[in-house]
Image: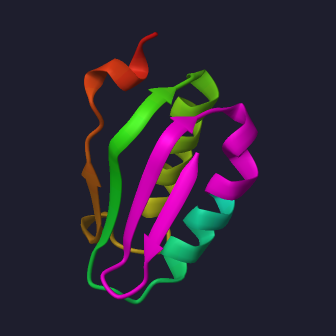
Amino acid sequence: MRIEFNDSDSQVVLIGELTFNDHAAFREMLTRAMRSTGAKIVLDLSRLDFVDSAGLGMLLIARDEAGKGSPASRWSVRRSRSSAFSR
């Protein structure tokens, strides 16, 4: 997985595959996004090619974290192609 983080508009783009091996990088990205002072944080999943069960779990963690320290309304998700969730 590759992560592009745009601090100016708090947009995070996940690219490639989101798998168990990406857990540390995903957590780091999530921590950085939560520190963002932007009005909205966009998690762009549209460029993911594959998400395994661990990756799905990481997305659930992101959802839970979004509801904690900052209003959930700050978060927006740009959806992936449906084929990313099946192989």
> Which span of residues is magenta-colored?
1-26
Q: Is residue 8 left or right of residue 16?
A: left
Q: Which residue is depicted at the point 46% across and 47% down?
A: 15
At a point 50% along the width and 52% down the height, the residue shown is: 62
Which residue extends farthest top? 87
Q: In the rendered image, is residue 82 in sight? A: yes
Please say whether residue 63 is visible from this viewpoint: no
**In this view of the protein, which residue sits in the foreground, 68 or 58?**
58
**Residue 27 percent location from the top left of the image:** 66, 58
Residue 41: image location, x then y, percent:
34, 71
- Total numbered circles: 0
The figure's colour scheme reads: rainbow
Above or below: residue 6 compared with residue 30? below
Quadrant assignment, res 81: top left
**Residue 21 coordinates in the image, percent (x, y):** 74, 37
Q: Position of residue 61 (x, y in %)?
A: 55, 47
Q: Is residue 72 magenta?
A: no
Residue beneath the point at 40% across and 89% down: 37
Q: Quadrant of the rendered structure where residue 13 is?
A: bottom left
Q: Is residue 17 above or below residue 29?
A: above
Compared to residue 19, the image places residue 37 above or below, namely below
The quadrant of the picture occupied by the N terminus is: top right
Which residue: 36% across, 77% down? Answer: 10
